[in-house]
Image: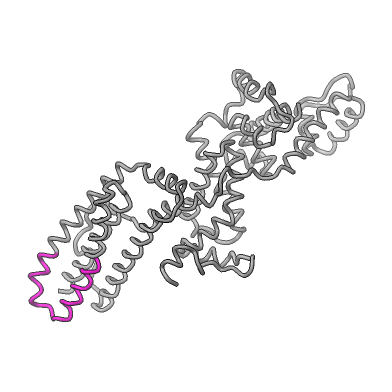
């Protein structure tokens, strides 16, 4: 900070005007500058102008949104749901990576996963029907970001899991003879839940082939199917 | 609760009269409840919008940033430990999101204070040729260069110190001071000609 001189013919520096106006000037300097302001109408008027700006800033109401902020929520929710339900690995997971636990618990987990998939699908599909036009635009804008890469990855993931599921299904047919009727029926019920979700997704994709969320959910549902079939294989 | 009720937020908010039991809502949102997070959004979106709007000076960009802030908040909500109010946590998060946007979109904006060329551009942009005595603060802020506007909003509106601004933006504290003074000068020309 420049040294203040008592010479009344010299005007205050910019720094002195600013820091005096906003109160950040040290007290000792403040007294000296105050004396100058009593004698110098030009500097006093300028400091007063800065103070008016500071008062105006403090009292200004917050800016009003151009449209309701509620309109932004569907787009935010779509992005959140996207992150919440889709965690696709880039490669097919290693087979038999996890040791097998208790049979009843495994099936409970499998069913819960299938149920979760159904809920996720419902939530993912629902906002399309209810969100506003602005919300759709906001959501679509976000989804378009990196959409080509993401879409390709989702299609590849779905195909990869589908192929793996088919291999495991073939293996399951060979194992059926060794499974009891109850276990076999339980497997079929679990697979039916997943297959139902897959069929619903495939139907939706036929209407909207470039919908990234649908593609990702389809990949995830095939992964669920693979998980169910792996549990069967491990149990055998 | 039915799926539809959860999806629409019906019955999902911990509301007693007009008072939202924010701690419960935050906890539920941290556990993955999107409906609870929607309640937080509706509570805090206006303040986040005001901050974003003033920092970038553009409504369309501010609305994009509001979305980015809340998506980021969702991703990081588990790191909120409750030592401060959620509004304070969100405020700091929003500042960071806006600064990231400014850095990536206008990499030089926060540093351009030293050159004479920039002085000319600054003066021209904030020139009061079409100044309106009734112009409001936000319209005037929108005319400032990004760097000056950012520092002015952080210091004079949000109350940060120059050292804090320096840490957040990566500029020197002295640069922050100069930006602030230039912003004030430009605003007085626009608002108090």
Task: Name the residue rendered at 19%, 67% in the picture.
Answer: A229
Q: Position of residue B139 (x, y in %)?
A: 65, 34
The answer to whether residue A81 is left or right of residue A72 is left
Give the colouring mode of the picture: one colour
Q: Where is residue A73 in the image (x, y as percent from the top left)?
A: 49, 52
Majority secondary structure in the magenta region = helix
**Residue A184 magenta-highlighted:** yes
| Camera-side residue of A77 and A178 | A77
The answer to whether residue B1 is left or right of residue A220 is right
| Camera-side residue of A68 and A223 | A68
| Camera-side residue of A178 and A129 | A129
Quarter of the picture holding the C terminus of chain B: top right
Q: Position of residue A14 (x, y in %)?
A: 76, 26
Quarter of the picture holding the N terminus of chain B: bottom left
A202 above or below B96? below
Task: Name the residue rendered at 51%, 48% in the picture.
Answer: B69
B144 above or below A202? above
Q: Position of residue A59 (x, y in %)?
A: 74, 43
Residue A83 in view in this figure: no
The answer to whether residue A3 is left or right of residue A172 is right
Q: What stretch is highlighted in magenta?
A: A169-194
| Camera-side residue of A37 and A127 | A127
């Amino acid at each position: 900070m420049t040294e203040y001189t008592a010479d009344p013919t010299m005007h205050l520096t910019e720094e002195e005007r600013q820091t005096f106006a906003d109160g950040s000037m040290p007290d000792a300097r403040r007294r000296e500058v105050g004396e100058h302001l009593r004698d110098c109408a030009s500097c006093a008027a300028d400091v007063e102008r800065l103070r008016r700006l500071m008062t105006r800033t403090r009292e200004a109401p917050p800016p009003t949104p151009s449209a309701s902020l509620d309109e932004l929520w569907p787009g935010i929710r779509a992005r959140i749901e996207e992150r919440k339900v889709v965690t696709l690995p880039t490669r097919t997971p290693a087979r038999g990576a996890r040791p097998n636990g208790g049979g009843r618990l495994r099936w409970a987990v499998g069913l819960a996963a299938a149920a979760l998939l159904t809920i996720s699908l419902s939530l993912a599909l629902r906002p399309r029907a209810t969100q506003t036009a602005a919300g759709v635009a906001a959501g679509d804008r976000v989804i378009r970001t990196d959409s080509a890469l993401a879409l390709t990855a989702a299609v590849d993931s779905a195909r990869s899991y589908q192929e793996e599921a088919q291999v495991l299904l073939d293996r399951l047919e060979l194992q059926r003879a060794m499974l009891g009727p109850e276990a076999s029926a339980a497997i079929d019920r679990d697979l039916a839940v997943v297959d139902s979700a897959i069929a619903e997704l495939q139907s939706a994709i036929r209407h909207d082939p470039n919908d990234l969320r649908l593609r990702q959910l389809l990949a995830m549902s095939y992964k669920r199917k693979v998980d169910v079939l792996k549990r069967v294989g491990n149990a055998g | 609760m039915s799926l539809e009720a959860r999806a629409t937020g019906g019955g999902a908010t911990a509301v007693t009269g007009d008072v939202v039991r924010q701690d419960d809502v935050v906890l539920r949102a941290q556990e993955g409840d999107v409906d609870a997070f929607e309640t937080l959004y509706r509570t805090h979106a206006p303040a986040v919008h005001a901050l974003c709007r003033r920092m970038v000076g553009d409504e369309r960009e501010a609305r994009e940033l509001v979305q980015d802030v809340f998506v980021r908040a969702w991703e990081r909500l588990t790191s909120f430990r409750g030592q401060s109010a959620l509004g304070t946590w969100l405020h700091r998060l929003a500042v960071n999101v806006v600064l990231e946007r400014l850095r990536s979109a206008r990499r030089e904006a926060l540093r351009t204070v030293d050159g004479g060329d920039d002085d000319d551009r600054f003066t021209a942009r904030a020139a009061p040729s079409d100044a309106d005595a009734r112009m409001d603060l936000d319209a005037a802020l929108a005319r400032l260069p990004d760097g000056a506007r950012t520092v002015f909003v952080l210091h004079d509106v949000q109350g940060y110190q120059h050292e804090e601004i320096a840490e957040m933006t990566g500029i020197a504290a002295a640069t922050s001071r100069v930006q602030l003074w230039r912003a004030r000068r430009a605003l007085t020309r626009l608002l108090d000609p």
